[in-house]
């Protein structure tokens, strides 16, 4: 999908403010909803994914099952609001052995479990907005002893609000991020 593009810096795959934030994504909803709402904390449009069960309401990129993202940037970042419910996301990568490895992070998993094709990890989220940064190269090397080649697919499950999902070539400090990738805090202390 992004295979032929020069990849450095930032590559966004979801931005809640855009005219069609889910144009690259497939939506699955059962006993929940996926909709754009205005978040009071940041006074901005965000994508809300809510479901009675984490595994039955989610979005997947790319939307077409036979296509892959082909993103070679090793850092996945998500600006996510914790809704005090169970939440998970999955990333499918290809390593240098041509093996597809899936990483699943959730706030209901208590321990890390590594199987030949899947690594399940616990994740702690703070109240409110969180910036999740996931070093796919490091996780692939530590879990499987192989090298990360590219990201094939991303899946974000209920229950969260999403501002942005992007890849980058390295970790960037808050000061280095472009303005549209930040959550601003006004003088009163709230996120704007």
Image: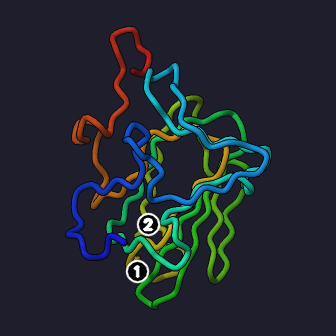
Write the residue at 46% across / 90% down.
98
Return the mark for residue 159. none
Mark 1 or mark 2, which has the lower sequence index? 2
What's the colour scheme? rainbow
Q: Position of residue 128 (x, y in %)?
A: 56, 29
Residue at the bottom extreme, as displayed: 97
Q: Position of residue 94 (x, y in %)?
A: 46, 80
Write the residue at 64% across / 83% down.
116
Q: Position of residue 146 (x, y in %)?
A: 45, 83
Return the mark for residue 136. 2
Quadrant where the C terminus is found in the figure: top left
Residue 26 versus residue 52 in the image, above or below: below
Quadrant where the N terminus is found in the figure: bottom left
Q: Which residue is mark 1?
A: 147
- CA neighbours of label 1 inside 10 A, class few (<14), some (14 to 19), many (20+): some
Asked if labels 2 and 1 touch by Cβ distance under 8 angstroms, the answer is no
Task: Give the side of residue 65 with respect to residue 169, left or right.
Answer: right
Task: Give the side of residue 71 with respect to residue 8, left or right.
Answer: right
Q: Quadrant of residue 105?
A: bottom right
Q: Give the structural element (helix, strand or loop) at label 1.
A: loop
Residue 12 versus residue 152 in the image, above or below: above
Observer-nearest of 180 and 139: 180
Q: Position of residue 179 (x, y in %)?
A: 25, 35
Write the residue at 40% across / 80% down.
147
Q: Quadrant of residue 160?
A: top right
Residue at the top extreme, as displayed: 188
């Amino acid at each position: 999908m992004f295979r032929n593009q020069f990849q450095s810096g930032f590559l966004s795959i979801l931005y809640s403010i855009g005219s069609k934030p889910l144009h690259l994504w497939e939506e699955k909803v059962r006993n929940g909803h996926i909709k754009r709402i205005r978040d009071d904390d940041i006074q901005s449009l965000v994508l809300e994914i809510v479901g009675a069960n984490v595994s039955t309401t989610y979005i997947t990129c790319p939307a077409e099952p036979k296509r892959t993202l082909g993103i070679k940037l090793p850092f996945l970042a998500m600006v996510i609001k914790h809704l005090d419910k169970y939440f998970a996301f999955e990333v499918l990568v290809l390593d240098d052995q041509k093996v597809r490895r899936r990483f699943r992070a959730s706030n209901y998993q208590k321990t890390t479990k590594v199987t030949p094709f899947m690594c399940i990890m616990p994740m702690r989220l703070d109240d409110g907005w969180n910036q999740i940064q996931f070093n796919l190269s490091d996780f692939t090397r530590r879990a499987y002893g192989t090298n990360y080649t590219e990201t094939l697919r991303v899946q974000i499950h209920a229950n969260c609000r999403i501002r942005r999902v992007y890849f980058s070539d390295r970790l960037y400090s808050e000061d280095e991020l472009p303005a549209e990738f930040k959550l601003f805090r006004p003088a009163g202390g709230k996120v704007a």
